[in-house]
Amino acid sequence: SSWIWNFIQEQEEIRTWRFTGAGQANSVNGDFSSSIGGMAEFRLQPLDWLSFHERASIWAGSEELPPNGFSPYHLGDEPGRHLYVDWGFVSAGNQSIQVSVGRIPMRFGPGRFSQLLLSGKAPAMDMIRLDIDLINGVDFTGFTSTLDADSSTWLSMHRLDISPFRNLRLGVSESILYSADGIDLAYGNLFVP
């Protein structure tokens, strides 16, 4: 059996927070396992053009597996409690252009149930991201991220979406995974394909 409890509190339009609690207990062939955790999200928008986003989770489990609803990327090497900052980033911009920097959850590409290039189930990545609404129905997204803070592996992606009609969406995407000691501007340039 498992349970999930959500509590959402919204105050005005500039502050939002949410807490999720989850737990589960399982007995399979006489083996008992349990896990419990909590997740807190916070959003602050002090100015019309600036917002801060944060999500942290803590969990503990007998099998070192997180409860349902928690990221599977938080597998611990040691028994006990696990505290993670799932994401944390700052965004600046308006309705036409948005720049975001930090550890950002990302899904990239079209898809009705999942995405072709980068699914929404991937862990948040440390990145710089640019979103531009060029004209009505034409959007551009580009980002450069590191896959692991301790590695020299980088991922850069660009996508141009065109929606000429309500039920038609066309897109062109490119992505490259490369290794370098830092951002390679030839690949990491958000404007040049």
Image (cartoon, grey):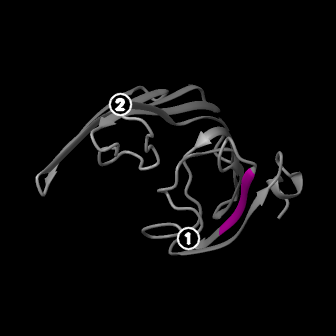
Residue 35 placement (x, y as % from top left): 26, 40
The furthest residue to the right: 186
Q: Secondary structure at mark 2?
A: loop
Residue bearing mark 1 = 116
Q: Which mark sits nearer the N-terminus, 2 or 1?
A: 2
Kind of element beneath mark 1: loop
Point 71% across, 47% down: residue: 151
Amino acid type indicated by mark 2: Gly
Provide the residue designation for mark 2: 80
Stretch of the chain drawn in magenta: 153-161
Q: Is residue 156 magenta?
A: yes
| Image-quadrant location for residue 46 | top right
How dense is the environment of label 2, judged by Cα within 10 Å: few (below 14), some, or many (20 and up)? few
**Is residue 131 one of those drawn in magenta?**
no
Q: Which of these two is toward me, 163 or 50?
A: 50
Residue nearest the viewer, comparing 96 with 126: 126
Mark seen at residue 162: none
User: Which of the two residues, 108 or 122, is positioned nearer the viewer here?
Assistant: 122
Label 1 environment density (alpha carbons within 10 Å; few <14, some 14–19, many ≥20): few
What number of labels is visible? 2
Work out whether 67 lies above or below 8.
below
Q: Amino acid at mark 1?
A: Leu
What residue do we see at 82% from left, 48% from top? Answer: 183
Residue 95 lies, with reference to residue 83, above or below; the image says below
Compared with 112, 107 (above or below) is above
Where is the C terminus found, in terms of image quarters? bottom right
